[in-house]
Image (tube, rainbow, N blue to C red):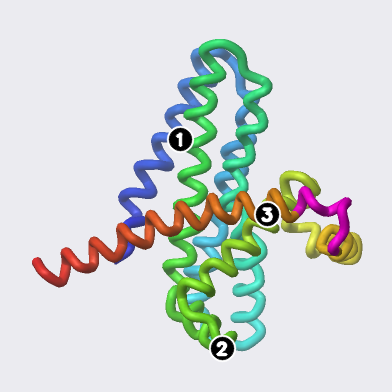
Amino acid sequence: MNPLTEKNIRFIFISALTLYFFRAMVSWDIRFVFLNWNLFLAWLPVYFARKLNKSSGRPFQVIMLALAWFFFLPNSFYIFTDLVHLQWSKGFWKAYDSILILAFALSGAAYGFLSIHLLKEPLERFFRALSLDHIRGMFALLLLCSFGVYIGRIGRWNTWDLVFNPMDFFQYVFEITRLSNANVEVFIFTGLFWLFLVLIYTVVYQYSLKREMHEVHS
């Protein structure tokens, strides 16, 4: 049983939009309009996951959809880092905008974990092929997502750079993954953000297990 049902996610999504439009109408300030775009990018993994589940099984189509899902997945968790934009806010609005950004971030994360849930079976097969159980496989996936968030927030790269500027993108990735003192911040940021995502996943996973046990005994 997945706790991230369409109903629950829709509630978080509507709450986030309501907070944004209230902010815009009351203050006549649309500086946080980018959150809507970021949330759209966070939803795309759900779209690709559903397309994958409905794919005809053609190898090329499956591979392209799987790659699109994988490379867009970090966008689902990226919005947490938009908290850096609180520097724009002052007084009462700083507290309000904290809640606003977190609402969008939770909505984005919900989309990310929903997309993972939609691909549960193919991911399980992929993890087994790598000799990983579900937990280790998920931890590895979340680690890659955390690294992707670093690339987006600190490196300022976009997902579509993989298509339009792949050589420079992969050269950048190669440079920041070398073991050197210059790259310490890469490993610190990635590690801390990974621990944060693991914490969220653990809460969701434990809630799922409790729901399943309740379903069995009811």
Magenta stretch, main secondary structure, is helix
Position of 65 relative to 172 (above/below)? below
Report how far apart the C-alphas of labels 1 and 2 lie in the structure: 39 Å
Q: Which residue lies furthest to the left in this view?
A: 218
Q: What residue type is labelled 3?
A: Thr
User: Which quarter of the rendering shows the N terminus?
Assistant: bottom left
**Location of mark 2 (residue):** 129
SS state under label 2: helix
Seen at 55% across and 54% down, the residue is 195
* Circle 3 Cα neighbour tier, 10 Å, few/some/many (<14 / 14–19 / ≥20): many
- Position in image of residue 134 (x %, y %): 46, 76
**Tags 3 and 1 touching, CB below 8 Å:** no
In this view, the mark in front (3 or 2): 3
* Circle 1 Cα neighbour tier, 10 Å, few/some/many (<14 / 14–19 / ≥20): many
Magenta region includes residue 182:
yes
**Location of mark 1 (residue):** 16
Q: Which amino acid does label 2 sit on?
A: Ala
**Location of mark 3 (residue):** 190
In this view, the mark in front (3 or 1): 3
| Segment colored magenta | 179-186
Report how far apart the C-alphas of labels 3 and 2 lie in the structure: 25 Å
